[in-house]
Image (cartoon, rainbow, N blue to C red):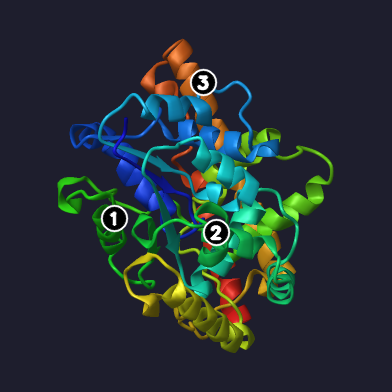
Amino acid sequence: MAERIFLHVGAPKTGTSYLESILWANRRHLLNDRIWMPGDSRRAHDALMGDVRGGIWRHPNSRWTWDRMAAEAKEREGTVLVAKEMLAGASAQQAARAVDCLAPMNVHLIVTVRQLAGSLPSSWQQRIKARSLMPFTEWLQDVRSQPDHGFWRHQDPVSILGRWAPGFPAERVHVITMPQAGSDPHVLWERFASVVGIDPDRYTSPVGPSNESLGAVEIELLRRLNVALGQNLPFRETYLSTVREHFTNPVLFETEEPVRFGVPEEHFDWMVERAQQTIDELKAYPCELVGALEDLRPALTPGRITPDDVTDEVMAARAIAAIAQMLVQQHDQRLAEAADAAPPKAEAITTASGAGSDLPRRLGRRVRTLLGRVRR
């Protein structure tokens, strides 16, 4: 029987993708350290989360269920680690069933938490990438006015622990603060590794960011596209396999110097008050705090625009650039497919590397020029 089971249940957008990228890249190394992660890829943990939460999250044809994971954990030695941020949204009943299924093994809960000035824009962006339609500032007002808003269900560490770890002893509840923006991301990994009990320096870290964000123009373009789609391409699999695969990832993420956005300054005092509430609650909560609670105090970044500030002129220029980029990519793909089928003579190939392929880049520069006007 496993000596310990660590359930990293979120919160989303708190460096979880970065941590998971390290864990999966070093899965064999973890096994050598007697730490088993069920499955061969993140999809296994997607399925485990879906089995706990049900509904649209369920993967009906997956080999991995929570019961299977629990049964295998009882046949193993060492440590079992499950890491899936969307487990944070489980109901109290769903979480209780998941924990009870692991009895009598020694279950530990891990929750990572981030300051609001970072988690609010990131959470809204994730909603848009999952087909939401609501503008950023309207969504912010809803978050502020609704104590039971879904944002708090997924982001408030005390709410998450209240559903996942009622009655747990403090030594089995671990809250890790995400370092402030601009910090070395390795610090977060060091904090996580200290909880699991491994040497962080013995594991390979990803070179670049593991879950990049779209800029203000690109995410607003995607939101308006969601509106234009109407009832077409319903969420979940149809939308993700079409829009994410053919537009979001290959086109919108391929942007030079995306314009970052943030929470408007008029919300700053509220964020400070809400952060202090979370800090006070965590101080009183029976748990192990890893990191500094001061990391949860929001930092204001003056002058940042919001996606709602993007003008129709900027949006039109960016949309044209996106169309041009998609056409160039399709052209390149056809050439590659033709070369694979029957390689032509080198001099007969007309590639997209000439002047035509520079169109998206030139249009991108036009977008940045127009954005300069928005800031002034």
The three-letter code of the residue at mark 1 reads: Val
Q: Nearer the viewer, mark 1 or mark 3?
A: 1
User: Which of the two labelled residues, at mark 1 and mark 2, occupies the earlier sequence position?
Assistant: 2
Q: Secondary structure at mark 3?
A: loop
As drawn, which residue projects farthest toward the right?
231
Q: Compared to 107, does 213 lie above or below? A: below
The answer to whether residue 359 shows anywhere in this view is: no
Q: Position of residue 291 (x, y in %)?
A: 31, 70
Q: Which residue is mark 3?
A: 63
| Front residue of 205 and 156 | 156
What's the distance in space between the residues labelled 1 and 2, CA to CA?
18 Å
Dot 2 alpha-carbon crowd within 10 angstroms: few under 14, some 14 to 19, many 20 or more: many
Q: Position of residue 45 (x, y in %)?
A: 47, 36
Q: Compared to 255, does 346 lie above or below? A: above
What's the distance in space between the residues labelled 2 and 3, CA to CA?
27 Å
In contact (CB < 8 Å): disc 1 and disc 2: no
In contact (CB < 8 Å): disc 1 and disc 3: no
Q: Position of residue 52 (x, y in %)?
A: 59, 38
Number of the label disc, if any, that sits on residue 195: 1
The answer to whether residue 372 shows anywhere in this view is: yes
Query: On the picture, is 339 further left or further right than 359?
Result: left
Q: Nearer the viewer, mark 2 or mark 3?
A: 2
The three-letter code of the residue at mark 2 reads: Ile
- Residue, x 60% and y 52% (percent of image)? 89
The three-letter code of the residue at mark 3 reads: Arg
Q: Position of residue 215 (x, y in %)?
A: 54, 63
Q: Tell me the quarter of the picture where residue 74 sits.
A: top left
Q: Which residue is mark 2?
A: 160
